[in-house]
Each structure stands twice: as structure tokens, then as C-alpha cells.
Image: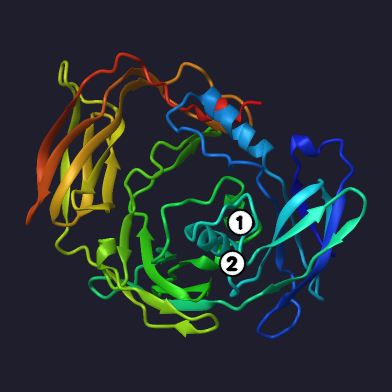
Amino acid sequence: MVCGWAIATQQGMGQQLGSVSGHVTCGDTQRPARFANVMLLGVPKGAPQTPPNPNADAATIKAAMNSAMDAVNVVQTQTGMDGSYTAANVAPGDYYLFASVPGYVQPSATVQAAMDAGADVTKALPGVAIVHVSGEGGASADITVERGGAVTGHVLWDDGSPAAKAIVTVVSTKASDKKLPQGFGMLGNAGGLGGGVISFSDDLGQYRVAGLATGEYLVKVTMVVRSNFAMQRGVMNMAGLGADKPLVAYVPGSFHKSGAKPVTVTAGQEQSGEDVTIGLTGTHSVSGRVVSAEDGHGLNAGAVELTDASDNDLVRGAAVDASGNFMVGFVPAGTYNLTATGGADTQPSKNKPTGIVRFTMPETVRSYEDGKQSVVVGDTDVVGLSIAVQPSKNVKPGVNLNDLLKQ
């Protein structure tokens, strides 16, 4: 049985719907791709939607999110044992047609490579089929997926022990800063599409990233080092999630992207032995306090980031505690630009959250401007920093997740 789900846009309501059917075949074996994920993604009309400004108020962000969702046409389904699929209830229009099979080149990688090469996502993309759907009958389209390459290795601490739960991603050395537009982001999280270009290290530190097209890549390891979550009486407190920025390292063990070793991958082949060592020996902590420039009291909300002065890709950071204190750990030696952002005096919300999903969100009483200074990390920890920030003229309320979830 073929199953599927659809996101219908307002523009598709009331229209006569069509269908798309066909087969997905594995290019290396010429056998059917069984239970493969198939996605129809509407070709954007005009400029793709851009993400909302994260600093806007909840109403503005919600309106931007609704507008972006209204512009998305997606239908996903799966193949059967013979590799056949049928996507029903498809609104009329032009669609990109993708298929995803573990170990085969993933759709998100194909689109990202096309964008990096300068392709316009509102038009035909190299290597991606386009199918036209009308309400007058069914369309037919077959897809062939090509076997990708793989990279394997171990993630280790500098004492040789395995580093488990590390997120391992493989990034093309030719990748630009262009991000997949909204809608295309669903290629990476809908029904497993795109899942082949990311991996997690197991209890032995082993990882394997598959589904890679031929090319030159950097292997990037991300390790979450501190995260807290609480739910009491059905109310979630997410203030501690991502309290510290994760550790990032590259094969063979550099914290700097410029020190990463490129790995050449050939489609259908496996590149093994690409180990990465997360070397914490020799790193240090940077600690201090974020205070009001008016009276010196510590701010109970905000975050601190350290950005390497010669490498914008190396960023360490942490949130302040209830007294304005912060401690950024695992900082390599170097000169950093320290920035204190999102500083605020807050108090517990007087409004009781309602609904099935509830979040506890503090109320901002006073907001502060960003603070900046230079920090040099040498052979010892840096302690006792004081970052004085000026009060803002206006209160920046931030985004209340409860407001975003309200209908």
C-alpha cells in the first residue's frame, strides 16, 4: 500500500486536484527502489520566501511564517515493493520531483549544489525533474536514483576515548553561503529525505555519512556540551536549551575550518579512516559578568559570544545566569571579539500559559544594547571580565512561543 501526506495551500483549495505516478529505480542495480520516499515540491513563483526577522515581534513573525507556508506546495508518498508510487490529491501546478533512498545521492544535496553553482530555484534545476500537474488527468514520471559515496571514521577525545553522540556532517568545499529557501528545507526533514548526509557517532565513536555525490568535502563534527530542559505541571521551560554553543571540530582535529583536511569522495565508493580528534587539552574558559552601565547590577537574561578575530567560523558562547554571570568553556588560544547580546532584566510572566503545548516565558522589564570588547586567550583561563551595557530606549519583548502557537 502506498501512503502519503500533503500540505495544501490556500491557493489549491476548491481546485480540481490531479495525481502523479511512476517508478523509482536504483541506477547501479536497475532494481526497484522499495519504500523510497517520493516528494513533489511546488516550483516557487517569483522570489522564494525568506525567513522572518528573528528580532521582530510575535505577530510579525507569525504573519511571515503563515505567508511562507501559504506559498508551499508539498505532497509526499512512498514507493511499493515494485518501486511504483502514486501521489494523489495534487493541486495543479509545476513541481520538482525528488526521490530519496538511503545510500543514494540525496535531494537536498542536489539542490544545494545547483544553488552553489548559481542556479535559479524558480526555474529548472540540473538533475531535478519537473512535472506538470493539471486537474484533467494523471501525470507520469519515473525517477532514477544514483548510488552516492560514503565517508567513515571515528570521533575521539584527545585521550583516545570515543566521543559518542557527536553530530557529523559533510560539507562541500565549494559550498557557498546560500541557504535552501523555505519550502526546500523540507527536503531535509520530511519523511527522512536528506537523512543520508548527516550521521551520529555511536558508543564506539564510529560514524558513517552516506549518499554523497562525487566531490571534495570537509567533515564537520558538532558536539552539544550543555543543555537543560524542564517540564513541570505540563509547562515547559526551554531557557536552558542550547545554553552553550556546541563544540565544532573538523577532520583531522582542527577547531578552525581553515585547518580542515579536504576529503575526496567518489560516487559509489567508501572513503574510510577519516578520524577526528576533539582536542580539549590546551583550551581555556572565559568568564565574567554582564552588568548594567547605570548601576552595575547583573542582567538575568542575555548571552555572550566569542568570535575568533581571524576566523568568523570559530564561535564559542554561553548564556548568562540569573545574576548576569557567564562562563564560556573550551576556548582555544587566540584573540576574540566578545559580544554580549539580548541583555535584559526580566521577571516571571503574570499570564498563565494555556493550551496543550505550554511554555513558561519571562516578561522583559528592560532591554539593553549590545556590548563589545576584545579578549585575548593565552595559556590560562580568563576570569573577572565585566561587560557594561547601556539600557535601550525601547523594551524588546522578544518572541513568546505561546503567542506563536495561538490560532
**Residue drawn at 63 percent across, 41 percent down:** 46
Which one is in front, 215 or 242?
A: 215
Q: x and y percent of residue 108 in the render?
A: 57, 60
In this rendering, position of residue 118 left or right of residue 298: right
Outermost residue, top direction? 393
Residue 262 visible in this rendered orientation of the protein: yes
Q: Nearer the viewer, residue 395 or 238?
A: 395
Residue at mark 2: 106
Give the x, y percent position of residue 212. Answer: 52, 72
Q: Mark 1 = which residue?
A: 187
- Mark 2 crowd level (few <14, some 14–19, many ≥20, 10 Å Cα): many
Q: How is the image coloured?
A: rainbow
**Which quadrant is home to the N terminus?**
bottom right
Q: Where is residue 317? Give x, y as percent.
A: 27, 45
- Residue 405 relative to residue 303: left or right: right
Q: Judging from the image, what secondary structure is the residue with disc 1 in?
A: helix
Residue at the image point whose x is 53% and y is 80% from the top: 267
Which amino acid type corresponds to the residue marked 1 in the rendered image? Leu
Left or right of 194? Residue 43 is right
Numbered disc 2: secondary structure: loop
Label 1 CA crowd tier, 10 Å (few <14, some 14–19, many 20+): many
Q: Nearer the viewer, residue 201 or 54?
A: 54
Looking at this view, name the residue that lies furthest to the right.
136
Quarter of the view holding residue 182: top right
Q: Is residue 322 found left or right of 98 in the rendered image?
A: left
Point 48% across, 83% down: residue: 270
Please tell me whether residue 365 is drawn above or below residue 241 in the rendered image.
Answer: above
